[in-house]
Every structure is written in C-alpha cells, then in structure tokens.
Amino acid sequence: MTDSKKALIIGASRGIGLGVVDVLAKRGWQVTATTRAAVPAKSPASVDWVKLDINKSEAREAVKDALSESRFDLIFVNAGVFGPGHQDINQATDEEIIQLFLTNAISPVRTAAEFLPLLKHRTGVLALMTSELSSLNENEVATYPLYSASKAALNMLTRGLQEATEKQELTLLSVHPGWVKTDMGGEDATLTVEESATGIVDQFDAYRSKGGHHFVEYSGRKLRW
C-alpha cells in the first residue's frame, strides 16, 4: 500500500473502528475518521477527525460538503450499536427498536449512499460493517435476535446500493469482523481488535477493483446470506 491511498472511516472513536484507523495509518494511508464525541486519546497523530452523528441528516450533509473536494479509495461505515441487553422483542420498547434499526441499518445505508460520490471511480471500495449473525444460514439459532435482525436489514438495504456502485464500477462489501474483544464482544471473544482490524484491512485491499457485492469475514472467508 502506498501513502497516496485515502480512507474515510465512519464511526471510529473506539473498538474495531479505531483499530481499522490504526492499521490503515500504520500502512501509510491518509485517513479521515469520524466520531460523535471527543477525538480518542489513542488516535494516530496523522488522522484527520470530523464530528458526525450519522442519525442526523444535517450532520451528514455538513460532513459531505466539507469533504466534497476529496476522493477516497475506501469508505467504511462502521457505526453501530448492540441494542437492549436482554435482546427480547417482547421486553424492548418501540423507541429502543426504532433506535436500533435507525443506527444499525437505515442511517449507515443513507450515509453510504450520500457519500458515494466521494469514492474514486472503478477502484473505490464501499464497505459496511455487518455480522454473520445477520445471516439465516450462519445464525441458525437466532443468537441476539434484535441485533441480528437489524444487521439483516442492513444487508438488504446495502444490496440496494449495488446498482449505484456498479455505475461507478466500485466494489461493495458487507464485512463481518469476527468475535472481537470489545465492549460489545466481551472478554470471552476469540479475537483482539488488532487481529480483526488487520484482517478487515486485508479484505479492503484484496477486493479492490473486483466489483460486485460480497459478504466476507475478516479472514477472507465468504459468508452465506
């Protein structure tokens, strides 16, 4: 990878998002990253940080306008939440469910669609963070059903971006990070943030210029929808 490559990481204040920022920066990428709050203390010095709450349309528009002269090799929409800890649809309030689907499915795809013109034609990669739990084939026992359903909605809405990405000859990725030691994944998870982030960045590089829409794990394993 060369220092001419540019990435926009949306939702990068901690966990896997910050891990991806760190890996890209170490590999010489020019990275712009977004956060809803303060810039993380452990951010690489070379990273440009922008405030963004993807659930607010005016905030998305302001950031897009601010970056209008940039053209990125990669846009990665990582923002997401777990939702109610109990994961029980009968216990969850309407507002909890609405916020979960807004944050995990609707706003990420709106952001991706609105920022699409900022990607380089032909070689650009548009990636969204999903989960293997979103798949009826990979998640046979409905583990974490509310979270999984929101990510399944994300997958379908992401598929709706394929026509637009094909017109620009871009590659569209739905990325599963593995089970990672984060606030969401917990201490029993099998991967460190660095391991997951390194694998994710490897996939961004591997799928560059391939075109199409792919559902892949950090390791490169293709997942079933």
Image (cartoon, rainbow, N blue to C red):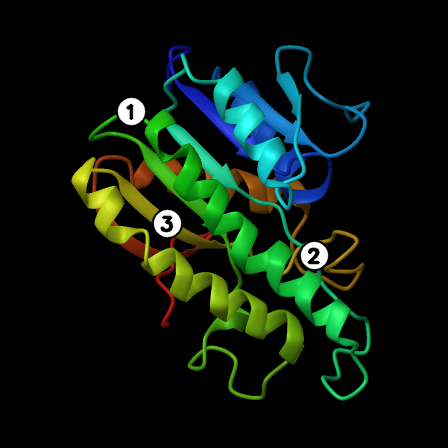
In the image, 150 versus 211, the foreground residue is: 150
Q: Secondary structure at mark 3?
A: strand
Mark 2–mark 3 distance (CA, rounded to whole Å): 19 Å
Please provide percent x and percent y for residue 37: 79, 31
In the image, 221 versus 74, the foreground residue is: 74
Residue at image position (34%, 36%) is: 125
Q: In the displayed structure, does residue 161 sit left or right of residue 146?
A: left
Name the kind of residue labelled 3 in the image.
Leu
Q: In the displayed structure, does residue 13 sit left or right of residue 115?
A: right
The image quarter containing residue 62 is: top right
Name the kind of residue labelled 1 in the image.
Lys
- Give the mark nearer the N terminus: 3 vs 1: 1
In the rendered view, would you say 43 is above or below 138?
above
Which mark is drawn over residue 173? 3
Name the kind of residue labelled 2 in the image.
Val
Please provide percent x and percent y for residue 98: 67, 67
Q: Secondary structure at mark 1?
A: loop
Residue on which the image places disc 1: 120
Q: Is residue 30 visible?
A: no
Which mark is drawn over residue 81? 2
